[in-house]
Amino acid sequence: MINFGIVGVGWRTEFYLRIAKACPDLFRVTGLVGRTPEKAAIVANWFGVVLYNSVDELVQSTKPLFVVTSVPWEVNPGMLKRLAGRGVPVLSETPPASSVEEMAELSALVGKGARIQVAEQYFLQPHHAARLAFVQSGKIGRATQAQVSVAHGYHGVSLVRRLLGVGFENAKITATAFKSTIVKGAGRGGLPSREETVESEQVIAWLDFGDRLGVFDFTGDQYFASIRDPRILVRGERGEMVNNSAVYLKDFLTPIHVDFIRHSAGEHGNLEGHYLKGIQVGDEWVYRNPVAPAPLFDDEIAIADCLLRMGEYAWGGADFYPLAEACQDRYLDIAIHESAREGRTVVTESQAWAG
């Protein structure tokens, strides 16, 4: 059983609470702390968790294995420092801080023994985890180019870096922003009540790592709009992967074409329940759902995977997305926006956390 506390009562907090409710044999929320008492009381009541008045009270009373900080950007660095001072392992929501200076300060905490991981879930979403596993299998050879149009900012950058196997190498970044119009689609609150045309901004960036190229491309409408799909392409010396299919060379005369096949219970009359089992490519499972048979959608499965990995980390296991990785992804995100805003190529420099 992984017992964890939560600080914050925003939109993302509800993901953690739903996951704990759907996986009672794996997770238990020991308590909740919120800055807005009225909202905190409502959320705690909805999910049947105990509400505490302060972080200190939560930690002292429940002794959680770790604490999730799901608070605004400007609040998070101070909360991480506070919990680090108490010796509590922390799973920080993304990003851990907004500026390079704040991230450097936090990295110094880790150097002094603070135990911090970051809840970056995109590389753990089933379809992306399957793609990463396939690329890392070596079938397409060494990946030299990744075009990612999936998620904004540091989320998209994290996928670019992982698909290319890039660590803390510096990059030449050239970015641009383009505005257009689109018929407004759904949002966090659901579908719109009437047709409306709104402005949409697309950011495209080239991240040249010397021997590998990342192409970041995203417009915020892709998260919800039914007419803006995500796209992903990874090219290697022996093949390429495009969205949910791939081609690679068995030998120099024999190309092999494969598809990524999702296997879910509950479809076509199946009576096992409704949940994702895993993803196959050819005769190989490239992904298995770590929290099956919980009825969770992909983003919730990924966050649940974060919680499982954070539990292992808090018990003395390995990093899964350490603060340094999160800082690097956010730093490249900052450089992308700087390049687009100023209309020039930005060359990144090694930062304090890159050691």
Image (spheres, rainbow, N blue to C red):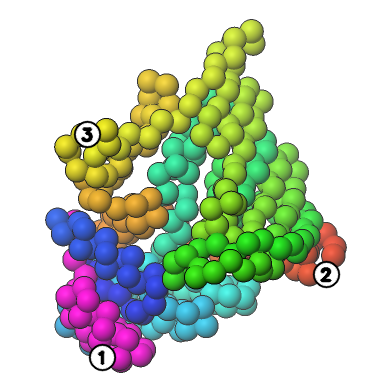
Q: Quadrant of residue 300?
A: bottom left
What's under tag 3, amino acid-wise? Gly
Q: Is residue 235 visible?
A: yes
In the picture, which quadrant includes the N terminus? bottom left
Q: Quadrant of residue 351?
A: bottom right
Residue at x-position 35% and y-position 90%: 36
Question: What separation in Å lies between label 2 and label 3 (alpha carbons)?
Answer: 56 Å
Q: Is residue 85 above or below residue 214?
A: below
What's under tag 1, amino acid-wise? Asn
- Secondary structure category for the residue under label 3: loop
Q: Nearer the viewer, residue 252 or 148?
A: 148
* Magenta range: 26-54
Q: Which is in the foreground here, disc 2 or disc 3? A: 3
Horizontal side, residue 141 vs residue 335: left or right: left
- Secondary structure category for the residue under label 1: loop
Question: What separation in Å lies between label 1 and label 2 (alpha carbons)?
Answer: 45 Å
Farthest right residue?
Answer: 344
From the top left corner, tell me how far across and down residue 238 is, in percent: 63, 22
Q: Which mark is residue 14?
A: none
Question: What separation in Å lies between label 1 and label 3 (alpha carbons)?
Answer: 48 Å
Residue at x-position 65% and y-position 32%: 235
The crowding category of the residue bearing disc 2, from other C-alpha atoms within 10 Å (few below 14, some 14 to 19, many at least 20), is few
In the picture, which quadrant includes the C terminus? bottom right
Q: Which mark is residue 342?
A: 2
Q: Is residue 30 magenta?
A: yes
